[in-house]
Amino acid sequence: MKSAKPDERKISLELTTYANSLRIALRRCGIFLKGDKVVGLLLPPEADLETYQRAVKSILVGGGILHYAVPLVRVSAYKRETDADDAVKTVSLSNAVIVVIAHGADLPPELSVSLDRLEQVTAVKPYHLIAAARTVLDAVITRDQATALFAYPLPLMFAALRRSRPIEVTLAKLAASKDLAVVPEVKLAVAWEPRIEQLAGYGKGHGLGAGPRRGYRRMETGRRRVARCGRGIAAERSARLWQDPVRERGSQIV
């Protein structure tokens, strides 16, 4: 069974788009001039470090600059802690380094003093995609189409940009993805527990407790009747005593 081949043109489109956003920063750092340098590229917020790293390497390969190292400086998602160990080690061993730095990173002093230049990278723009599509796919994406595509997250946009798929179909797919993202509310099932008479093996014993229960209810009914009768007699005697207390006490003496 043949393994599926990756869509190399789509991957190349993504890398070329990112590379287009990096060229100005690399040119300002003097990477394309003679002489080795140690520079830092500060990425925009929510940037994909690995994608930018691959894009930098693709630019270096395309320019025949193969001796540069490209380490990363990461920032943890939860505690926002900076991990610059790899970059610090690399700049201590080489004079040709391009450090790709995540947004919000707190650079250690030993790395900051090693950088010849620190350059801010602009976010990927629609015209970067337009130029990349013309170069990689030999396709024309209008400014309005590119602006509409950039209304979606970049990973989602590049996932929808497929080979031989018209841009109109891509935009329709992306628009439909908004409806797919709405997850209906799932109601939790109510826990059910069987009653004792529903348990296996209960069988004929279902009515064994009925007789004692009926007897207990009759006894309780008799007690309530006696109590009501006693309260009635006591109330009647109290009324007679209130009407003729002397006569009532005389009847008690006799």
Image: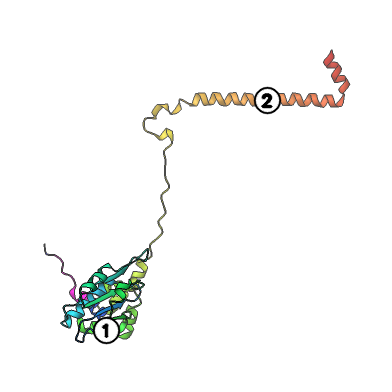
- Residue 17 x, y percent position in the rendering: 26, 80
Highlighted range, magenta? 3-11
Q: Residue under circle 1? A: 29
State the SS at label 1: loop
Determine which quarter of the picture holds residue 154.
bottom left
Mark 2 = which residue? Answer: 227
Q: Hey, what amino acid is under mark 2?
A: Ala
Q: Is residue 163 visible?
A: no
Q: Is residue 243 magenta?
A: no
Q: Which quarter of the rendered picture does the N terminus lie within?
A: bottom left
Closer-to-camera residue (63/13): 63
Colour scheme shown: rainbow
Query: Please, is residue 243 above or below residue 250 in the view?
Result: below
| Placement of 32 over or under 183, stated as above or below | below
Q: Which one is earlier in the sequence, the residue at label 2 or at label 1?
A: 1
The location of residue 231, given as percent across then percent down, is 72, 26
User: In the image, what residue type sits under mark 1?
Assistant: Cys
- Hey, which quadrant is residue 128 in on the image? bottom left
Q: Which residue is located at x 75 percent, y 23 percent?
A: 233
Locate the C terminus by quadrant.
Answer: top right
Question: Where residue 67 appears, x then y in whole percent?
Answer: 16, 77
> Residue at image x 37%, y 63%?
79
Q: Residue at x 43, y 33 (%)?
A: 196
Instruction: Tell me the crowding category of disc 1: few under 14, some 14 to 19, or many 20 or more residues within 10 angstroms, Cα based.
Output: many
Residue 222, percent from left and from top: 63, 24
- Foreground pick, 164 / 16: 16
